[in-house]
C-alpha cells in the first residue's frame, strides 16, 4: 500500500511558511466564532449552534496542533475521497432534511467528517488500543454521529406530536410510521427525542466544558506565571468557591439569576473551572521555573506570549486528560440539574428531563416490561457516554505515563 | 506539641474565614436579585406604597452591613423568617426536614463506611488480582452512573419487580415519611434511598481508600519491613495502619461531605421530605428564605466536615505527633 500524498491533504508547508501567527489568529477566530454561535443561538436554533460548536472545537484542535501534528499530511487520499463521498451522499439522500435545517445539517456533517479524519489519522494508535478504549472510542463515535446528524436520522421532529400519549414500544402511529420506543406524555416520539437529546445534552456539556477550560486554564496559567498577589487573590477566590458543595451553589445562583440553559452553562462553567484552575496552576508552577521560561522572560516576551508559547504547549498532556474527566463531571452535573428541572426549557429534548418526565412509567414494569424501562433508556445513555469517556481517558493517561518512563 | 496546635489553630482560623465569606455570599444573594427582593416577591402589579412598606418591614432601608448582622443573628438563633410560598415559619419547617435528611445520611453512612473501607483495603492488598480488577470496573461504572439512574434501578429491582398482585412489595418506591412514623417503619421506608446513596458513595470511597493504601504500601519503610522479614500481618497492623489512618479518615470525611450533595438528587427521586427536596422546590418558586436557610445548612455541614477531615489528618500524622 503506497502512501499517496494529494495536494489538498497536505497543507503543512503553507502553515509552516506563515508561521505560528496564522495558526493563532485562526485558533482565536474559531474560538470566538464558537462562543458567538453558542451564545447567540442557544435560545432559538440550539441545534445549529451545537453542530457548530462540535466542529469548531475539533477545528481549533486541528489548527492549534497543526495538520502535521495529527499526521494528516500522510493521509491516504482514498480515505479523503471516501469521506467526501460520504459527505455528498449524506447531503443528497437527506436533501429534504437538509433544507429544513440547513445550518445544523451542514455543521453536523462537517463535524462528523472532521472526526472521521482525526480517527483515521490516529488510526495507528487506535489499532493498538486495549479493548476498553476501543469500546470507548466506538461509543463516542456513535454519540457524535447521533448528535451531529440528529436532524437527519431522527424519524420525527424534536417537538412534533405524532400520536397518542404514552404509546408502548413499536406501536403504529397515525401517519403509518412506527414509534420504536413509544411516545411520551405529550405524544412525541421517544426515539426522536432521544436522538435530539444527544445533540442538546452532549452539545451543551461540550460547550460548557470548553468554556470551563478556557477560563480555568487561562486563569491558572496566569496565576502561576505572575505569582504574588494575583496568585494569592485567585487562589483564595477558588478556595471559597470550592467551600460550598457545587450542586448547592449552583441552585443558589440559579435562584438569583434565574433559570435557563445559558445561565446553567455559565454557572457550571464558573464552578467547574475552579478545579481546572487548580490543576493548571499546579502543572504550570513546575513549568514556569524552567530555564526556557526564564529565557523567554529575559528576551522581553509579553505575559500572554509566555503563557501561550512556553507554558501551554508543555502542559497540554495533563490538561487534555483533565478535559475528558471534566467533561464527564460537567455532563453528569447538567444531567442532574435538568433531572431536577432546571436548565433546558420544555420543548427542548434532553436526557435528564426525559428521565424525570417519564419516571412514573417505572411502575408499569410488571404489566409491560418495555414500557417500564423507558425512563431508564435516557439515563443509560448518560451513563454509557460517561463510562466511554472514562475508558478513553484511562487509556490516554496510561499511554502518557508509559511515554514518560 | 505546640507545632501541632499551631497548625490546627491555623486551619481552624482559615475555616472561620471561609465560613464568614460563605455567609456573606448567601446573605448577599438578595442584593444580586434583578430588581429587588420586594418587587420580586410582590410581582409586577404591586403598587409603589406596598413595595415601600415591604421594604421597610424587611429592613431594606437599612445599609447592607446592618442587615447582614441582623440576618446572621437571626440565623444563628434559628429565626429564619417565613416561607414565601406557604407562609410557614422556616425554622420549624427546616428543622423537621433536616432531621429527615440526617436520618437518611446517617443510615447511608453507617452502611457505606465500613463496607467501603473493607472492600478498599482488600482491593489494595490483593491488587492486580481478579478481585481488584472486578472492583475497579464496578466502581468506575457506578461513578459514571448518575444518582437518579442508580435510584431508578433500585426501585425497579427491589420495589416494582418484587411487587405482587395484592399490591405489596419488598420496599416502597416512595419514601413518604411523616413526623409520626415509627423508627422501624422509617428504616423500611428509607431503605431504598439509603441503599442508593450507599452505592454511589461506596464506589468513591473504595477507590480513594485503595489509592491511599497503595500509595502507602509503595513507601520505602514498608519495603524495609518486608526485607527485614517481618510477618505480613504485622507489617499491616504495625507499620501500614498507623500511617494509613490519616488518609483513611480524610477519605471518610470527604465522602460524608459528598453524601450531602448526593442527598439532593436522591431525595427528589424518592420524593423524600428532606432538606434537599425542600431546597429544590424552593429554588423553583424562588422562595428565598428557604433557599438561604437550606444552603446555609448544607454549606455549614460541608465546611465543618472538610475542616474535621483536615484537623484529623493533622492530628493523626505521626510525623507531627512525634516531632524529632
Image (tube, coloured by chain):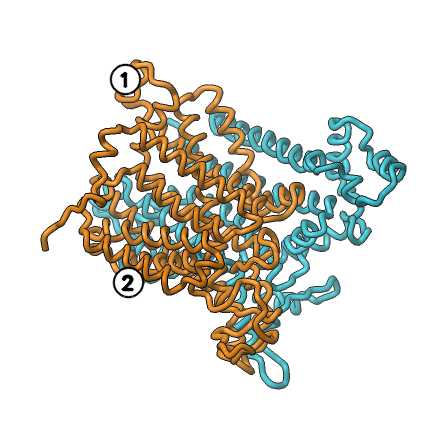
Chain colours: A orange, B cyan
Q: Residue most toward the left?
A: A2
The total of numbered circles placed on residues is 2
Quick one: quadrant of the C terminus of chain A?
A: top left
Q: Residue B262's x, y, as percent? A: 55, 54
Residue A51 drawn above or below residue B149: above
Residue B271, given in percent of the width and then of the height, sits at 65, 63
Q: Chain of mark 1?
A: A
A297 horizontally vs B299: left or right: left
Q: Looking at the figure, which quarter contains the N terminus of chain A?
A: bottom left
Residues at marks 1 and 2, CA–CA distance in whole angstroms: 51 Å
Residue pointed to by mark 2: B130
In the image, residue B219 lies at what x, y percent? 28, 40
Residue visible at 51% across and 33% down in the picture:
A238
| Front in this rendered view, residue B309 or A37 | A37
Q: Residue at x 53, y 72 (%)?
A: B156
Mark 2 secondary-structure assignment: helix
| Disc 1 secondary structure class | helix
Residue located beneath label 1 in the image: A295
Relative height, residue A324 to residue A146 (above, below)? above
Chain letter for mark 2, please. B
Residue B53, picture quadrant: top right
Q: Is residue A121 left or right of residue B60?
A: left
Amino acid at each position: 500500500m503506497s502512501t499517496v500524498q494529494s495536494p489538498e491533504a497536505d497543507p503543512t508547508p503553507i502553515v509552516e511558511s506563515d508561521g505560528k501567527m496564522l495558526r493563532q489568529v485562526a485558533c482565536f477566530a474559531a474560538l470566538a466564532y464558537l462562543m458567538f454561535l453558542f451564545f447567540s443561538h442557544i435560545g432559538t436554533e440550539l441545534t445549529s449552534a451545537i453542530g457548530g460548536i462540535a466542529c469548531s472545537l475539533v477545528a481549533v484542535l486541528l489548527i492549534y496542533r497543526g495538520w502535521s501534528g495529527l499526521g494528516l499530511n500522510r493521509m491516504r487520499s482514498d480515505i479523503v475521497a471516501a469521506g467526501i463521498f460520504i459527505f455528498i451522499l449524506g447531503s443528497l439522500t437527506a436533501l429534504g432534511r437538509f433544507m429544513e435545517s440547513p445550518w445544523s445539517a451542514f455543521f453536523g456533517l462537517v463535524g462528523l467528517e472532521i472526526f472521521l479524519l482525526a480517527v483515521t489519522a490516529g488510526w495507528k494508535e487506535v489499532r493498538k488500543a486495549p479493548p476498553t478504549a476501543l469500546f470507548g472510542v466506538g461509543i463516542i463515535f456513535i454519540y457524535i454521529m447521533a448528535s451531529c446528524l440528529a436532524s437527519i436520522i431522527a424519524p420525527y421532529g424534536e417537538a412534533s406530536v405524532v400520536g397518542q400519549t404514552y404509546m408502548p414500544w413499536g406501536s403504529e402511529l397515525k401517519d403509518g410510521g412506527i414509534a420504536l420506543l413509544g411516545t411520551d406524555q405529550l405524544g412525541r416520539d421517544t426515539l426522536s427525542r432521544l436522538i435530539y437529546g444527544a445533540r442538546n445534552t452532549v452539545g451543551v456539556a461540550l460547550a460548557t466544558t470548553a468554556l470551563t477550560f478556557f477560563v480555568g486554564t487561562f486563569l491558572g496559567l496566569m496565576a502561576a506565571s505572575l505569582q504574588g498577589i494575583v496568585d494569592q487573590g485567585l487562589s483564595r477566590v477558588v478556595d471559597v468557591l470550592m467551600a460550598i458543595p457545587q450542586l448547592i451553589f449552583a441552585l443558589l445562583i440559579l435562584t438569583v439569576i434565574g433559570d435557563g440553559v445559558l445561565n446553567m452553562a455559565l454557572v457550571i462553567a464558573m464552578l467547574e473551572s475552579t478545579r481546572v484552575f487548580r490543576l493548571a496552576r499546579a502543572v504550570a508552577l513546575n513549568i514556569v521555573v524552567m530555564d526556557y521560561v526564564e529565557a523567554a522572560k529575559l528576551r522581553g516576551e509579553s505575559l500572554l506570549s509566555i503563557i501561550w508559547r512556553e507554558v501551554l504547549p508543555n502542559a497540554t498532556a495533563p490538561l487534555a486528560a483533565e478535559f475528558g474527566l471534566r467533561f464527564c463531571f460537567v455532563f453528569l452535573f447538567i444531567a442532574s440539574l435538568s433531572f431536577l428541572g432546571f436548565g433546558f426549557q420544555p420543548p427542548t429534548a434532553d436526557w435528564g428531563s426525559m428521565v424525570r418526565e417519564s419516571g412514573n412509567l417505572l411502575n408499569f414494569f410488571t404489566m409491560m416490561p418495555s414500557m417500564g424501562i423507558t425512563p431508564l433508556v435516557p439515563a443509560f445513555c448518560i451513563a454509557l457516554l460517561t463510562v466511554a469517556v472514562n475508558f478513553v481517558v484511562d487509556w490516554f493517561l496510561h499511554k502518557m505515563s508509559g511515554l514518560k518512563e | 506539641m505546640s507545632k501541632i496546635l499551631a497548625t490546627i489553630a491555623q486551619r481552624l482560623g482559615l475555616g472561620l474565614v471561609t465560613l464568614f465569606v460563605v455567609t456573606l455570599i448567601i446573605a448577599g444573594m438578595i442584593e444580586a436579585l434583578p430588581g429587588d427582593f420586594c418587587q420580586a416577591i410582590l410581582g409586577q402589579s404591586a403598587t409603589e406604597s406596598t413595595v415601600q412598606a415591604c421594604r421597610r418591614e424587611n429592613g431594606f432601608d437599612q445599609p447592607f452591613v446592618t442587615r447582614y448582622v441582623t440576618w446572621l443573628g437571626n440565623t444563628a438563633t434559628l429565626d429564619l423568617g417565613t416561607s414565601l410560598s406557604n407562609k410557614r415559619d422556616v425554622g420549624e419547617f427546616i428543622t423537621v426536614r433536616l432531621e429527615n435528611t440526617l436520618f437518611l445520611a446517617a443510615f447511608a453512612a453507617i452502611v457505606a463506611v465500613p463496607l467501603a473501607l473493607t472492600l478498599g483495603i482488600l482491593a489494595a492488598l490483593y491488587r492486580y488480582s481478579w478481585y481488584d480488577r472486578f472492583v475497579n470496573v464496578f466502581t468506575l461504572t457506578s461513578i459514571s452512573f448518575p444518582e437518579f439512574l442508580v435510584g431508578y434501578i433500585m426501585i425497579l429491582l427491589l420495589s416494582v419487580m418484587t411487587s405482587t398482585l395484592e399490591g405489596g412489595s419488598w420496599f416502597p418506591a416512595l419514601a413518604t415519611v411523616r413526623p409520626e412514623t415509627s423508627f422501624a417503619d422509617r428504616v423500611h421506608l428509607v431503605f431504598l434511598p439509603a441503599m442508593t446513596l450507599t452505592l454511589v458513595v461506596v464506589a468513591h470511597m473504595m477507590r480513594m481508600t485503595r489509592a491511599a493504601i497503595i500509595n502507602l504500601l509503595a513507601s520505602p519503610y514498608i519495603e524495609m519491613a518486608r526485607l527485614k522479614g517481618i510477618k505480613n500481618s504485622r507489617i499491616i497492623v504495625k507499620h501500614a495502619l498507623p500511617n494509613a489512618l490519616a488518609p483513611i479518615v480524610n477519605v471518610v470525611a470527604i465522602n460524608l461531605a459528598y453524601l450531602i450533595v448526593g442527598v439532593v438528587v436522591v431525595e427528589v427521586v424518592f420524593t423524600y421530605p428532606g432538606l434537599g427536596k425542600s431546597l429544590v422546590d424552593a429554588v423553583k418558586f424562588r422562595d428565598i428564605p428557604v433557599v438561604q436557610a437550606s444552603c446555609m445548612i448544607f454549606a455549614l455541614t460541608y465546611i465543618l466536615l472538610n475542616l474535621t477531615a483536615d484537623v484529623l489528618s493533622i492530628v493523626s500524622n505521626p510525623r507531627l505527633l512525634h516531632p524529632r
